[in-house]
Amino acid sequence: MFKYVKYILVVMVLGMGLIAFNQIVKADNEVVDVGENISFRKIDPEQAKQFMDSEANYVILDVRTKPEYEDGHIKNAISLPNEEISPDNKLLDELLSDKEQMILVYCRSGRRATDASIKLAKMGYVNVYNFGGIVNWPYEIVK
């Protein structure tokens, strides 16, 4: 009897692992609704790189701190720390004047990029793409 319980537990654990993996895979290119008909897209680094290689009108937004940015960033990224993203920041109007322009957002691990993406979407930016953190960026960075 104990032998069968052990097998059942193994099958259950494997099944839960497959369900969790499926949810992670579905998270790519997911529309994240932040309420009031406001949303942004969550994509993976490979999709972000495809946009960078094929699109012309986009901004890469690094929302880490200035020292983090200076330690290494994605080529052509603009540094605008998450803490500085607010409707009152006049620099934001200069850097991101077109609210329909594609904005590719990243940070170190993804948390601040999500926070920044929510703020940008709430401020009326309609093409916000969060591709997580530079720790998952498999391509070249510049210093």
Image (spheres, helix red, strand yellow):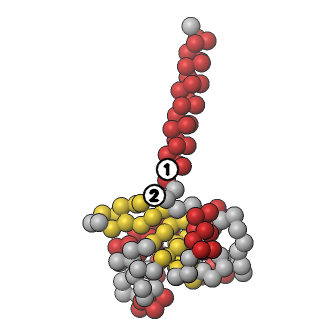
Residue closer to the observer: 12 or 86: 12
Above or below: residue 53 compared with residue 29: below
Q: Which residue is denoted by mark 1 in the rendering? A: 26
Residue closer to the observer: 82 or 121: 121
Residue ranking furthest to the top: 1
Query: Looking at the picture, which amino acid does disc 2 mark?
Result: Glu
User: Visible in this render: residue 59?
Assistant: no
Query: Looking at the picture, which amino acid does disc 1 mark?
Result: Lys
Left or right of 78? Residue 121 is left
Q: Which residue is denoted by mark 2 in the rendering? A: 30
Residue ranking furthest to the left: 36
The residue depicted at 48 percent of the width and 62 percent of the height is: 42
Do tag 2 and tag 1 residues touch (Cβ < 8 Å)?
Answer: yes
Q: Quadrant of the N terminus?
A: top right
Left or right of 82? Residue 49 is right
Q: Quadrant of the C terminus?
A: bottom right
Q: Position of residue 40 (x, y in %)?
A: 42, 67
Q: Position of residue 26 (x, y in %)?
A: 49, 50
Above or below: residue 9 compared with residue 98: above
Instruction: Give the Cα distance between marks 2 and 1.
Output: 7 Å
User: Visible in this render: residue 58?
Assistant: yes
